[in-house]
Amino acid sequence: MIKNLCYIFAILLSACANSDMKKSASVDDICGVVESVINLGQLQQYYHVDTFPERVPLNIKVHLPESISMRDCTILEKFGQPVIITSDKKPPKASGAMGMIFRINDLEEGSMFVNFSYMPEGIKGEVKLLNIESLWTIKESKIIEI
């Protein structure tokens, strides 16, 4: 009897522990989020790649939560060239040489929140995205000139 109760308790404890765990974002999730943000309609007016050709290719430094593993998203393109993405587990520092700096935060399964800055233009922004049918869709966005 006690052995059965211990077994049932272990199963229940395991189920509770697993229910509190978030599904960690995959590399595909990160690539989809980055792609949605760099293609944000409001952001296009700030790139000025026709005036500043040195801004191509687009360079992005992504600060990720510890739970996310990242490798380059080689499929992403902007301005007809592959986007260069580097990742960092440390908080990003503002840098004029870096095109964009992203901080991606898991809110809950199926949604993410991104803070970004684009130092060449002195802007920063916030974007909330939802994963709808495996596509990262922007729900809310805000850009601020600093």
Image (tube, helix red, strand yellow):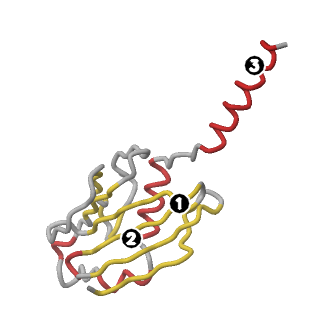
Q: Residues within 10 Å of mark 1 (few under 14, many from 20)?
A: some
Is 27 or 113 nearer to us in this picture? 113
Residue 75 image position (x, y, % from top left): 40, 54
Marked residue nearer the N-terminal end (3 or 1): 3
Q: Which quarter shows the C terminus?
A: bottom left
Among the 4 quarters of the image, the one containing residue 100:
bottom left
Is label 1 in contact with label 2 (beta carbons under 8 Å)? no
Is label 2 in contact with label 3 (beta carbons under 8 Å)? no
Give the labeled residue for mark 2.
38
- x 78%, y 24%: residue: 8
Outermost residue toward the front? 2
Residue 87 image position (x, y, % from top left): 29, 51
Give the labeled residue for mark 1.
107
Among the 4 quarters of the image, the one containing residue 139:
bottom right
Mark 2–mark 3 Cα distance, whole angstroms, equals 51 Å
What secondary structure is found at the residue carrying circle 1?
strand
Give the labeled residue for mark 3.
7
